[in-house]
Image (tube, coloured by chain):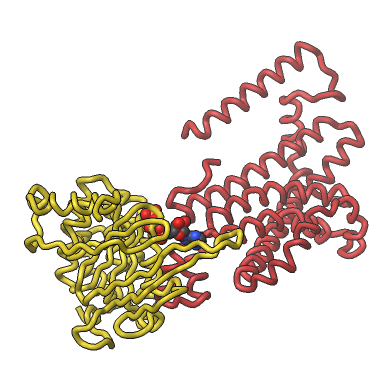
Amino acid sequence: MAGATGGVGAPGGPIVRLEGVGLHYRTANGDLLEAVRKADLEIVPGEFVSLIGPSGCGKTTILKLISNLLAPTQGRILVQGEPPSEAKRRRQFGFVFQDSVLLPWRTVMENATLLLEIVGIERDRMTSKVTELLGLVGLRGFEGRYPHELSGGMRQRVSMVRALSLDPAILLMDEPFGALDEMTRDRMNMELLRIWEATGTTIVFVTHSIPEAVFLSQRVVVMSARPGQIKEIVPIDLPRPRQVQVKDSVPFIGYTRRIRDLINGMGE
Amino acid sequence: MHARFLYPLGFGILATGLWEVLWRALRIPLWILPAPSGVMLKLYSMREYVWPHIRVTVIEVLAGFVIAFVLAITIAALVIFFEQLGWVLLPYIVIVRTIPILAIAPLLLMWFGFGLWPKIAVVILISFFPIVINAIRGLRSTDYRIMELMDSVSATRMQVFLKVRTRASLPLVFAGLKIAITSSVIGAVVGEFIGADTGLGYLIINASTRLDTELLFSAMVLLAALGLSLFGLVAAAERCFVFWGHQEST
Ligand SMILES: Nc1ncnc2c1ncn2[C@@H]1O[C@H](COP(=O)(O)OP(=O)(O)OP(=O)(O)O)[C@@H](O)[C@H]1O
Ligand SMILES: [Mg+2]
């Protein structure tokens, strides 16, 4: 899709680049809290990267830093070779949160077109664009339903369509399937991979599930807490397109064990 | 009919029947308490006389409620756009709320004359507060992640207001309206106590000075019916506008 890889950065260069990035939050009582320390990370266009680590290690914070919802207090971030604020201005970011945060008074179609309306795209183009995406996630025929009439998995699909509606170059997903049951989550994982392959979008994916991270990603960024730091980046070399059976394979289990040991502090 | 309505109706009929029976058994004198049957007969025989009083009170309630609604929503919207305006206004909104109506009643009569307007003013004074407080809270009650989403596409404050805040505010706006509509009925009656020659409040004062308990209770029955119907209308509007199911179960 147009815009998915189109950027201003040098061709072949990283789409996201964190150079010694640190972030201190100012808490309610005025103290500084170091949420992220000296993070270095390069993500290439079209890559699928997961962030994993204990609760509070700064995963959500890193997503917010990349997308300019927060500015780093140390270091520098470049997106497509520019400051993230520029990429944001060009609407290069799509968001999916843990729960779908749909507007309950809007139908599936109206929720999916929300961002397009804000941007001011004419109705015909909006409808055809979103209809295509709804087809991609298997929601054809549900256009007129309201969120409270959908299952959690379906709501999250609408949320994905909304995120993809502006053809973002980078899709930021914060535990998008964390609230779903395991079977639905597995299905959503397969669908996400299909969407990723169909759109060529770069995906930065936060999860608490080690198997999910290994199954989806090309690289898994393992973080440690207090202060949040990137501990290690584990490249995942498993056959693509991924099949569910890969989860029973020896290399897969090797990866999950290695990442678990890293998180538990036994990897050094 | 739905059990939701049958249950309270059944309770009312039972309680009224018991009252009637006890009233007859204990031979309660009329000037202490009338019997339900007596009240109903009174209401029926005086239907022609009572009608204009009902009309006047309904007009006062509706006019005051609608004006308070428009004022409160406008101010709530302005407070969302200009936060400092909220800092300036909120203390005064609270102060106005605490003004004892009876204390300023003579002033209201002096300013607005003897007609409908002093009563409408009392209705506005009483029903403005719950609407404005709940509307401000409702307009602010948006999920921060929706705001991040809006931020990510550089939505204007006006777009956020129109596409998100207005609808998101409805559950709380209706909570405020339900309090306001019943307060409006009280407001109109209190306004009529101050000085009136028509209206259900006037009827109550008139009946109680003459110890006409049957007329007094007739007026109260009419007030109850008015309050219930108006509340029912607001609740029906709520079910219509807040169809996604977070409304209170009242
Ligand atoms: N707005 C804020 N103000 C102050 N501290 C914050 C703020 N947001 C997050 N923090 C703190 O920063 C640290 C990192 O938070 P963050 O939300 O990035 O963690 P996380 O890795 O996403 O955790 P989880 O897995 O639980 O979602 C935490 O200690 C958190 O308490
Ligand atoms: Mg988080």
User: Quarter-wise, where is residue B41 in the image?
Assistant: top right
Horizontally, residue A138 falls left or right of residue B13, namely: left
Horizontally, residue A40 falls left or right of residue A241, namely: right
The percent coordinates of residue A164 (x first, y second) are 27, 70
The percent coordinates of residue A100 (x first, y second) are 35, 57
- In front here: A134 or A87? A87
**Residue occupying image coordinates x 48% and y 31%:** B3
**Residue occupying image coordinates x 83% and y 42%:** B203
**Residue occupying image coordinates x 63% and y 42%:** B228
**Residue occupying image coordinates x 76% and y 35%:** B218
Q: Which colour denotes chain A? A: yellow
Residue B129 vertical position relative to residue B203 in the rendered view, above or below: below
User: Quarter-wise, where is residue A147 in the image?
Assistant: bottom left
Residue B38 vertical position relative to residue A165 in the rendered view, above or below: above
Position of the C terminus of chain B by quadrant: top right
The percent coordinates of residue B176 (x first, y second) are 63, 52
Kindly indicate which chain is depicted in red in the rendered structure: B
The percent coordinates of residue B101 (x first, y second) are 85, 52
- In front here: A70 or B30? A70
Residue A257 vertical position relative to residue B162 in the rendered view, above or below: above
Count of all numbered marks drawn on residues in the image? 0
- In front here: A94 or B212? A94
Whether residue A63 is visible: yes
Horizontally, residue A49 falls left or right of residue B115, namely: left
Whether residue A104 is visible: no
